[in-house]
Image (cartoon, rainbow, N blue to C red):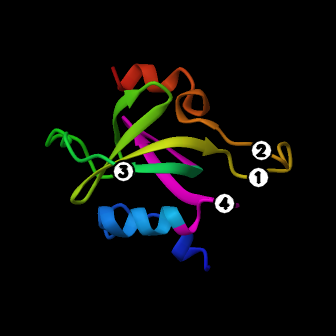
Amino acid sequence: MSDSERTVNWEADSTESIMRKALAAETQPGLKVTLRLGDKTVTRFSYGYTEEREQSAPSNIKVGEIFLRKLEAVCVKTMDGAVWIRMLRSLKTKENPLPFKVPAILQLGEEILKYVP
């Protein structure tokens, strides 16, 4: 798979397309996402997707923005719905050459508490 096939484009990818990409990229390195957390963005590899079928995001939420959290997962608005993401992993860096997957809430840390009740 190419990098573009392993990356979510929140403005162009439908929920169905994101779910297909997530299934194909479930192993290493995962599906690369840039998530919005208020006015901040974070880029991570993501795993453990589930489509949200019951709740829709409020109209003031932008695509790619986290608007719910439950247990260890976060819910992100897509262009035509929403998806839950269970696990995130940091990108490899010189300081952290072997990052590992952790629950999304832990990966985002206290920042998420400022933006998502």
Q: Pinpoint residue 48: horizontal percent, then vertical percent.
A: 52, 48
Q: Is 15 situated above or below 68?
A: below
How far apart, in angstroms, are the residues tagged by discs 2 and 3?
Answer: 23 Å
Q: Position of residue 115 (x, y in %)?
A: 37, 26
> Farthest bottom residue?
2
Q: Amino acid at mark 4?
A: Thr
The question of residue 38 being in magenta is answered with yes
In the image, which is nearer the foreground, mark 2 or mark 4? 4
* Amino acid marked by disc 2: Pro
Q: Residue at x 56, y 60 (%)?
A: 31
Label whose residue precedes the other's in the sequence (2 or 4): 4
Mark sitting earlier along the chain (3/4): 4
Q: Is residue 49 in the magenta section?
A: no
State the residue position of label 1.
Answer: 92
Q: Are marks 2 and 1 in contact (CB under 8 Å)?
A: yes
Q: Give the side of residue 57 with respect to residue 69, left or right.
A: left
Q: Which residues are magenta?
A: 24-43
Distance of mark 2 from mark 1, alpha carbons? 6 Å
Q: Mark 1 belongs to which amino acid?
A: Lys
At numbered mark 4, what does the secondary structure look like: helix, strand or loop? loop
Q: Earlier in the sequence, mark 2 or mark 3?
A: 3
Give the residue displayed 56% in from the left and 51% down from the top. 46
- Residue lying at 19% horizontally and 39% vertically, measured from the top left: 55
Would you name the residue on which mark 4 appears? 27
Amino acid type of disc 3?
Gly
**Residue highlighted by disc 3:** 64
In this rendering, which labeled residue sits more in front, label 3 or label 4? Answer: 4
Report x, y in % for residue 109.
57, 25
Q: Going from the N terminus, do you reach mark 1 or mark 3 first?
A: 3
Count residues near mark 4 (Cα–Cα under 10 Å), then give few for <14, some for 14-19, many for 20+: few
